[in-house]
Amino acid sequence: MDIINVLPSPPQFFHLFFRLSLSMFHSTINANYRRTITERSPAAFDVDPQTGFFPRQPLPRLPQTFEIWEKALREANENLSLGEDESEEAIAKRPFGEHWRTSVMSWPVIDTEELHSDLRLSQRAHLVLAWLVNFYVHSIPMNDSTAGDPVRVPKSIAVPLVQISRHLGFAPVLTFADTVLWNWELINPEEPLSMDNMRFVNSFSGTEDEKNFYHASAKAELRGVEMLRIFDEFHNLPNVTDLTSISKISRDLTRLAGIIDDISEIIQSVRPLCDPHVFYWDVRPWFEGSDAKGPNGPGWIYEGVDDSDQLDLSGPSAGQSSVMHSLDIFLDIDHKLGQRRYPAPTPENKRADRGFMERMRRYMPGKHREYLSYLASTLRSIRALAQATPTLREPYDTAVLALKRLRDSHIRIACLYVVTMSRTTPGARGGCPAIAMIERLQAARSSANGPVRGTGGNELSVLLKAGRDATRRAVLKDN
C-alpha cells in the first residue's frame, strides 16, 4: 500500500495533529483538576456523602476513665431546674441541684490527651462537657446579692473542655453540633441514620417541645445533604462552558431551589410541635452563653484557664449550621457588605454585626470549618458563571430568591418564638401577629429593657433582617 497517498494533505494533517495535541493537553489538565478535587473530597473534612455533617453512627460512650462525666450528664438530664424558675416543681429540684454542683466542683481535673487519637471520642467529650457546663451555670438559683457577678465554671469541667476544644478546633461551649449533630442515638441500630430512626438523648427541660425543636433542626440539616452533593458535583465538572455542563448546572440550580424551599417548610413545621411559650421560658434560657445578656453582662469565668475572658462562649445558634454556611458560600451571599450590589445596604444593615456569620464558624467543628474554607477558596464561582452565561441567570436567581424566602421564614419564627414571647410572663401564653412584627422589633430595641437578643447575645432583629437583605442583593436581575 502507498502510505504517502493515504495520509491527508499537509495543512489538514497539521490541523488534525494540533487538535489531537490540544485535546490531550486538556485531558491532562482536567485529569489533574479532578485528581486535586478527589484529594480534597468532602470526606477529608468529616463530611459524609450520605449524612453530611452528621456522623453515620452515634458517638461512642467515653472510656471508664471519664465515666464520672458521663454519669453526671445522665443524672442532670431532666433532674435540674433553671435557677430563675420559681415554680414549685423547680424549687423541689434544688436540693438535688445543689448536691450535683457540689459534686462537680469536687472532681479532679482529668486530662483528655488519651482521647485525641479518636475523632468520635473527642467529639463525645466535647458534647458531655459542654452540656455539663450549661447544666451547671443555668441551674444556679438566682440571688440578688450575686446577680451582677460573673458565673464561675469549676476547673473540673472548664479545663478539660478547653483542652478538647482546642484539639477539635472550635469553641469550648455548647454548640449546634452538641445539641443536634451529635446528640442522638439510633432507634434501630441495624438500620442507617434517618429522621425516622433517630431520637435525641440529652435535653435540659425534659419536654417533648425541646426534643421536637432538635428534631426539626436535624431534619433541615439532613435535607441539606443533597445540596452538598450539588456543590461537590459542580466543583468536579471538568468544564463549565460546554452545553452539557451548562444544562446540568441549570438543572442543579433549579433542584437547589427546591431543596431550599423544603427546608423553609421544615422550619415552619416546628410550630405545632414546639410550643413557643415552652420554648422561650423552659428551653431557651438553658442555651444562653456567656454574652447572652449583651456586651456589658456579667459573663462566665472558666476557672483554671488563662485569659478566660478571651474564649468564644456564645450559646448554640442556627447560625452555626455548616449546611447553611455552605449554601451562602456557594451562592456568594455577601454578608460582610464587601461587594457593590443593589439595592444599597440600609443604615440598619450597616449597623448589623457584619462579622456574625464568620464568628459563628468558630463554633463549628474544626474539620467542618476547613470544609467551608475549601469551598470559599475555589476559583470557580457559580454567581460569576451565571453572570457570564445568560441561560444560567434565571436558575441562579431562583435559588437565591428561595434562600431569601427561607430567611423570611426564619424571621417569622424568630418573631413567634422569641420577640413576642419576650413580652409574656412564664405563666402566660401569647400569640404572634405577624403583620406587627417590624413594629415589635423596633419597640424592643427602643424599650427600657434593650434589644431582644439571640442566645449568642446578638441583636436579633437587626441581624436577621441584615442576613435577609444581603441574600436579596445577590440577585443578578437587579445587578
Image (cartoon, rainbow, N blue to C red):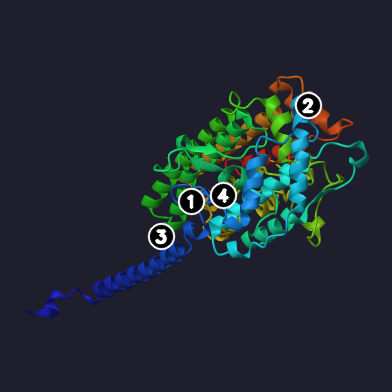
The tag earlier along the polypeptide, 4 or 2, is 4
Sort mark 2 into few (<14), some (14-19) or many (20+) by Cα contacts within 10 Å.
many
Q: Residue at x 13, y 75 (%)?
A: 6
Q: Residue at x 41, y 58 (%)?
A: 239
| Residue that label 1 marks | 231
Indicate left or right for 155 with 264 as reference: right
User: Measured along the vertical axis of the image, is residue 394 above or below residue 326?
Assistant: above
Quadrant position of the C terminus in the picture: top right
Of badges 2 and 3, the one in the foreground is 2
Identify the secondary structure beneath mark 2.
Answer: helix
Sort mark 3 into few (<14), some (14-19) or many (20+) by Cα contacts within 10 Å.
some
Q: Are marks 4 and 2 in contact (CB under 8 Å)?
A: no
Distance, label 3 to label 4, CA atoms, is: 21 Å
The tag earlier along the polypeptide, 2 or 1, is 1
- Report the front residue among 256 and 243: 256
Residue type beneath disc 3:
Pro
| Residue that label 2 marks | 440
Q: Residue at x 57, y 43 (%)?
A: 183
Residue type beneath disc 4:
Ser
Distance, label 3 to label 1, CA atoms, is: 14 Å
User: Measured along the vertical axis of the image, is residue 35 above or below residue 357?
Assistant: below
Which x, y percent locates residue 18?
32, 73
Of badges 3 and 4, the one in the foreground is 4
Indicate left or right for 290 with 211 as reference: right
| Residue that label 4 marks | 326
Res 302 visible? yes
Residue type beneath disc 2:
Arg
| Residue that label 3 marks | 238
Q: Which mark is residue 452?
A: none
Q: Are marks 1 and 4 in contact (CB under 8 Å)?
A: yes
**Residue that protrudes farthest toward the left in the picture:** 1
